[in-house]
Amino acid sequence: MKKMFNEIKKNIFICDLLFIGFNILINFILYLMNIRFRLWVIILILLISIIGFIVGIFQQIYLYSNNKKRVVFFSLLGTIAIIVLISIFMPIISFVTIFSYRPEHTTTLDNKKYVAVVSSFLHVDVDYYDYYGFLLMGTKVRVHGDFGKGGYDPFDKPNIPDGVEYTYYDNNGKIKSKRAEIFFKDENGNIIDKNNYDINIDDSSNFNENDNYLLPENEEVLYEKKFDETILRFGKVDNVLGQNMLVNVLRSKDNGKNFYVVSDDVIQVSNDAKFVFLNENLGFAINTGKIYLDNSKTGLYVTNDSGKTFKSAVFNYKNDNVSYISIEENPYYEKNSLKIKCSVYQINSNKDGYENKELIFSSNDNGLNWNLESD
């Protein structure tokens, strides 16, 4: 081993060329098997090759020169020049690196281990490759994850996206299935639950070039309200487990001739949900008819932008003897005041039985927060 090390020291340039040739051969063999080195291994190989090449050139010049001191002087001068050039061009190098760097993560998807490569300049896309240990990965994209608009790493900041659409590929690179995940978040923006549904990839369903255009019959109409020439609909997108469904809002501005998807994302509600639009902007979706006081589940969704986005309404009410209150009627206006009628089943004032007590809540911020009116 010591003898081999001494030979390498004497012939750095030749050894570096052999190292480069060996790695080219290895990469070619791996490529034939649809395997390649991980990014950090490629960077390490390149650094060793470049450093070995530069040091080897200097060594060869030194060995075959009659003026050793001059060679050492010019070698040091050349090294300094290289460092200065790198420093000068570092801002450009950093700029290019920022926009071309694609971080890798080892992750598990559908109970299978992958190497996930993130591209997140203006749109967050993640390509999932086969995992072959910490050194190697596959060359074919097995799954593609579309996390939507943004410039973040979904593995470093997992609570930012509202959902993701996965596209699965076969060995020939053809799409074999698609699946969507919708994330549900608490009031702090942390993901607390998610819902999955399959996406139909039948070519016959992609008849329209405009993905945001839907014919009225494409979705089951759950609720419809007309405001002059504008019609707003709650439509059923799909069924999900637990007697629930995914819904969104469609809008027509030409008296029902054409409908377009308004909602950025679908929301999950029970099959018995109720819906109402009080004007062109303000709308509500009552999930199960219950408002849980521990905020464990959204009871009332509210939108102030015609269904584009929905937020979970907050009810400012405390009662240690019950876990939820019931919504009796849809939100309504009374003398320009936004109200909602609820009830609570609790121990009566005599404490000898139970009673159903009416509760009237009002909101001063278009349904985002509700306060109990005094009896």
Image (cartoon, helix red, strand yellow):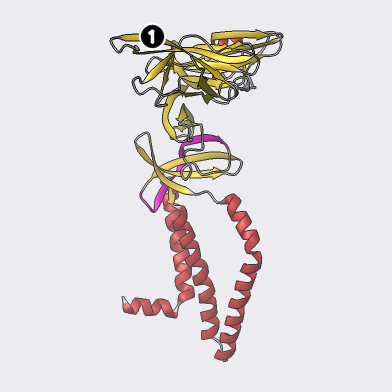
x and y percentages locating residue 163 in the rendered image: 49, 31
Which amino acid, by three-letter code, is at mark 1?
Answer: Asn
The residue that disc 1 covers is 356
Does residue 1 appear anywhere in the picture?
Answer: yes
Instruction: Judge whether residue 313 is colored magenta.
Output: no
Given residues 375 and 269, the one toward you in this image is: 375
Question: Residue farthest to the left?
Answer: 352
Q: Is residue 19 above or below residue 139?
A: below
x and y percentages locating residue 10 in the rendered image: 43, 80
Quadrant including the N terminus? bottom left
Q: Residue 110 is drawn in which quadrant?
A: top left
Instruction: Judge whether residue 134 is colored magenta.
Output: yes
* SS label for mark 1: strand
Q: Residue at x 64, y 15 (%)?
A: 251
Q: Residue at x 69, y 8 (%)?
A: 255
Q: Is residue 77 above or below residue 119?
A: below
Q: What type of secondary structure mainly makes up the magenta span?
A: strand
Residue segment shown in magenta: 133-149
- Assess disc 1: are there few (<14), some (14-19) or many (≥20) residues with their C-alpha within 10 Å of its C-alpha: few
Question: Residue farthest to the front?
Answer: 350
Q: Is residue 291 above or below residue 43?
A: above
Given residues 197 and 39, the one toward you in this image is: 197
Does residue 200 appear anywhere in the picture?
Answer: no
Q: Residue 262 is drawn in which quadrant?
A: top right
Q: On the picture, is 18 further left or further right than 250?
A: left
